[in-house]
Image (tube, helix red, strand yellow):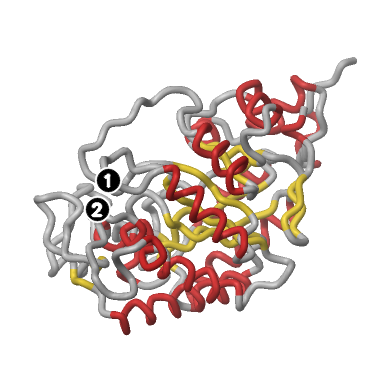
């Protein structure tokens, strides 16, 4: 199966095309990873995925979605993640990445109630423009140009800590209505300065982050960007914008565009069905000429193999299916007679034809 063939980005070779998609666990304290994260990510490495991507990790305190999200704005947080990286490298063939993120106006949420916290409980949210995600939420602080530039430096510092921690892949989260996506969309960005208005201005923040992050990467780290291919809203960000952006990303040394959708406009509807976002990844791959990752209700090896065989994507990002079954990769490889990493401690349990 093509699903079990290797692929290389810069000097980072993935043993297969199966990726554990970044999924928030809402289990950190002050942004610090703990034993839950160690077991959670370590078990997926034992399950044989080609790449694990750590959940959205805030580049500064206000960058977290909730009070229980991971962070990497200080050395204690970086050390907690380095322990996970070391285990994965020492005990599996998996590579491991981190998704650097800023929640923007969608932050300051209580993990316990899933509602925005008061200023006393949480923090002031920020955005390109004074437009809340939901009418019930408070108006976010509008960023000044100087504050935007400080945030770009926050991403650079977070990337440097990630490199020092040993991560193989850095992914920039520019999807799902979080801060970078808020800048991209004309529906959430109504600025009239160099960071608003025309496409070039609305993409400026992301492109400056890309340049800053690339300045600390070497050929031993690959750079991915997650985008929302469309936000399903009239006059909003759409697939044509995403293709145009992906061409810029390719020319800025981005190795793969991880294509999701939605998340920026409250109340929109989308048709959820198996592989519903795959055509977005296919458009990025074919029209922008850049490697693409497909995600979204992909649940079987047969479905993943068809996507790869039809050249709709280069990597398959599995989310809920990997939560349900950490050993999806090794079990699938048995059924297809493909080779996949298997922990030597468990060899006595490996199926045999004899």
Residue 112 can be seen in this image:
yes
Q: Is residue 207 above or below residue 258?
A: below
First in sequence: mark 2 or mark 1? 2
**How many angstroms separate mark 2 from mark 1 (CA)?**
7 Å
Residue at 27%, 45% (x, y): give it.
235
Q: Which mark is residue 37?
A: none
- Mark 2 residue element: loop
Residue lying at the far right of the rendered structure? 354
Q: Is residue 354 left or right of residue 215?
A: right
Find disc 1 in the rendering and name its residue: 235
Q: How many marks?
A: 2
Residue at 32%, 45% (x, y): give it.
263
Residue 173 locus on image (x, y percent): 45, 57
Residue 34 locus on image (x, y percent): 47, 60
Q: Residues within 10 Å of mark 2 (few under 14, many from 20)?
A: some
Q: Is residue 96 left or right of residue 152?
A: right
Screen quadrant of the C terminus:
top right
Residue 85 can be seen in this image:
no
Screen quadrant of the N terminus:
top right
Residue at 81%, 28% (x, y): give it.
338
- Mark 1 residue element: loop
Q: Is residue 257 above or below residue 216?
A: above
Find disc 2 in the rendering and name its residue: 187
Most foreground residue, 22 or 282: 282
Residue 328 locus on image (x, y percent): 63, 31
Most foreground residue, 288 or 5: 288
Q: Is residue 322 left or right of residue 116?
A: right
The reply to whether callout 2 and callout 1 are in contact (CB within 8 Å) is yes
């Amino acid at each position: 199966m093509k699903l079990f063939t290797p692929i290389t980005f810069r000097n980072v070779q993935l043993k297969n095309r199966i990726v554990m998609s970044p999924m928030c666990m809402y289990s950190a304290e002050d942004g610090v990873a703990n034993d839950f994260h160690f077991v959670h990510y370590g078990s997926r490495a034992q399950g044989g995925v080609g790449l694990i991507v750590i959940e959205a990790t805030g580049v500064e305190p206000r960058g977290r979605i909730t009070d229980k999200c991971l962070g990497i704005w200080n050395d204690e947080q970086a050390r907690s993640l380095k322990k996970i990286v070391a285990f994965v490298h020492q005990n599996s063939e998996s590579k491991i990445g981190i998704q650097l993120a800023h929640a923007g106006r969608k932050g300051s949420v209580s993990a316990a109630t899933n509602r925005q916290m008061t200023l006393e409980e949480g923090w002031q949210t920020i955005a390109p423009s004074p437009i809340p995600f939901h009418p019930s939420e408070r108006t976010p602080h509008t960023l000044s140009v100087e504050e935007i530039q400080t945030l770009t430096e926050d991403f650079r510092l977070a990337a440097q800590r990630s490199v020092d921690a040993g991560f193989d892949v850095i992914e920039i989260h520019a999807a799902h209505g979080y801060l970078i996506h808020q800048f991209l969309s004309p529906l959430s960005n109504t600025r009239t300065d160099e960071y608003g208005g025309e496409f070039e201005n609305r993409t400026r923040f992301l492109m400056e982050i890309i340049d800053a992050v690339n300045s600390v990467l070497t050929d031993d780290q690959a750079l991915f960007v997650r985008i929302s291919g469309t936000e399903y809203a009239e006059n909003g960000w759409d697939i044509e914008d995403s293709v145009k952006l992906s061409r810029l990303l390719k020319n800025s040394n981005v190795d793969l565009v991880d294509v999701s959708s939605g998340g920026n406009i409250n109340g929109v509807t989308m048709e959820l069905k198996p592989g519903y976002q795959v055509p977005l990844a296919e458009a990025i791959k074919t029209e922008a000429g850049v490697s693409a990752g497909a995600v979204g209700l992909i649940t079987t090896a047969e479905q993943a193999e068809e996507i790869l065989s039809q050249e709709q994507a280069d990597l398959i990002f599995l989310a809920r299916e990997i939560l349900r079954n950490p050993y999806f990769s090794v079990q699938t490889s048995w059924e297809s007679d493909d080779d996949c990493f298997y922990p030597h401690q468990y060899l006595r349990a490996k199926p045999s034809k004899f």
